[in-house]
Amino acid sequence: MTRSTRLGLIATVSAAALGLSALSAIAETPEDQLVVGFSMTNILTLDPAAITGKETVQVLANVYDGLVQLDPENRSEVQPDLAESWEVSDDATTITFTLRDGAQFASGNPVRAEDVVWSFRRLLTLNLAQASFLKTYGFTAEGAERAFTAPDDRTVVVTLPQKVNPQLIIATLGIVGPGSIIDSMLVQENELDGDWGAAWLSQNSAGSAAFSLQQWQSNNLVLLTRNDNFWGEPSTMRRIIWRHIPESQSQRLQLDQHDLDIAFQLAPADLKALETAKGIDIQTTPSAGFYYLAMSMADERFQNPKLREAMRYLIDYQGMNDAILPYFGKPHQRPISGGFFGLLADPGYAPDPEKAKALLAEAGYPDGIDVTLRALSDDPFLNLATALQGSLAQGGVRAEVITGSGEQIYGAMRERNFEMIVGRGGGGQLPDPDSNMRALIYNPDNSDEAQLTNFQGWRTSFSDPKLNEMIDAAASEADDEARRQLYADIQNRIEEVVVPIIPFSEVVTSVAYRDDLEGFVLNPSWSTDLATVAKVR
């Protein structure tokens, strides 16, 4: 592939618009532009209330601010963002945030407490994917007017609707999506029939961070431009060009040939090959969530716990981590992130096809079952699905692999219209086990109408009222030892009831980048701030 062809992949954004000459052979990306390669197959919208998947978070972390932000190097710490300070009331029922003075949105509109309140009310009213983060702590659309108030332009008061540790709420407001603050005046100018700007925000931005959205072409590119109204230190980068390059070898080639500055989704073999490449560095960090095998209990067969238990013994935990997940994951069988408070040792499951066959027979399937297994067509999911197809077959589970885009695979899961899926998720974006529990296990309303699409428990049609109560109790417990015991009890019950999500690896994130980048810090919660990056040449 020639250099002119590679640059031509930027589609309708002309070379001149990007500051590139179509006729000259450029040895490096421009000094004031950051070119990033990743897969966009799971980017379905750019509305912060509706996003799913880490790829969209990676983009919008550079477009929207929150009241606070999580420290990328020490996730247990919360740092100021649009709020310069906050205070928890003595009775732990309210949190009062004071906004920094003079902050503006990219539009030039001032950041007001009214915008903050409007953003949270919008989130809960629309009730899209990201609303689950607040709904799980008792926040509702009906109660939003009382829960979020603005006594003046710089003061936001959050009143907790139920007993919960206020630090969990503060940290939640640092997550891209539920915590993203939106320019209400700009969005209201673009509303359609009272949709809270949902149609407009799906392809436009209204944030206050270091960059704003200039263009999004699905499965092609996202173009961000520097926000000259940014309240913080301006980025040295004038543009960030996110390019859809789903093939790992293409990302590796373009990184090696200086056409990319950062490659976010490289396969293990390509990362291994780049370890000794001149001019390229690799960062690896523990990340959020797990790789898992999930079953849908909307399928009557999987309502039988014996059938779900059989799957525990048809996964080659170590083999998949060794062969497929170097740089992507590490062996892990509990639904709590490594290093988090209250984590128990792994239960130690290993492949045992004969035990699995016996459990299948007990469940009423002595001849095995036929299932469909969904997986993204990207690395490492397709390889994981192929490996699982082989190991499941050893126990009589005949899996037909279905691959596709994020809408085809996770869309089916959000609609509760699947049988089995190999996926990635499970929280961990907050530095607390409650994040994992609510993402993977918690499901307070199993009805189709509830649409708790951000909860894996709801997606798999699993609901255990006792587990819900235990999770709520652990979230509100102030005593560390009592809370630790609660999480031990929760993990033991998860094993007992056989939840339909089986983690087999904890996600780690590995990124390769040109070594002339300074200030690049990979965020384990996916929200990497690229405004801090400069090129030193």
Image: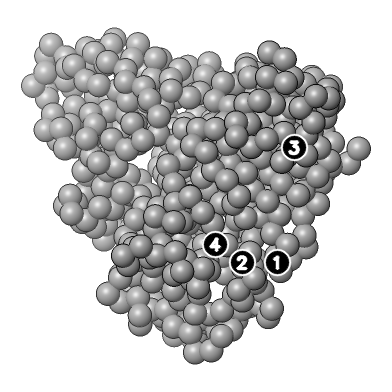
Query: Which mark's residue is nearer the viewer, 3 or 2?
Result: 3
> Dot 1 surroundings within 10 Å: few (below 14), some, or many (20 or more)?
some
Q: Is residue 368 left or right of residue 97?
A: left
How was the colour assigned to the protein in this rendering?
A: one colour
Q: Is residue 454 left or right of residue 532?
A: left
* Residue at mark 1: 229
The residue sitting at 72% across, 33% down in the picture is: 15
What numbered label is drawn on residue 206? 4
Q: Which amino acid does label 1 sit on?
A: Asn
**CB atoms of marks 1 and 2 within 8 Å:** yes
Asked if 432 appears above or below 18 in the picture, the reply is below
Q: In which quarter of the image is residue 328?
A: top right
The kind of secondary structure element at disc 4 is loop
**CB atoms of marks 4 and 2 within 8 Å:** yes
The kind of secondary structure element at disc 1 is loop
* Residue at mark 3: 16
Q: Which residue is more in the foreground, 112 or 330?
A: 112
* Residue at mark 2: 107
The kind of secondary structure element at disc 3 is loop
The residue sitting at 32% across, 60% down in the picture is: 127
Question: In x, y percent, where is residue 292?
Answer: 39, 32
Q: In this view, does 309 lie to the left or right of 385?
A: left
What numbered label is drawn on residue 404? none
> Dot 4 surroundings within 10 Å: few (below 14), some, or many (20 or more)?
many
Between the C-alphas of marks 4 and 3, the distance is 26 Å
Q: Which amino acid does label 2 sit on?
A: Ser
Earlier residue among tags 1 and 3: 3
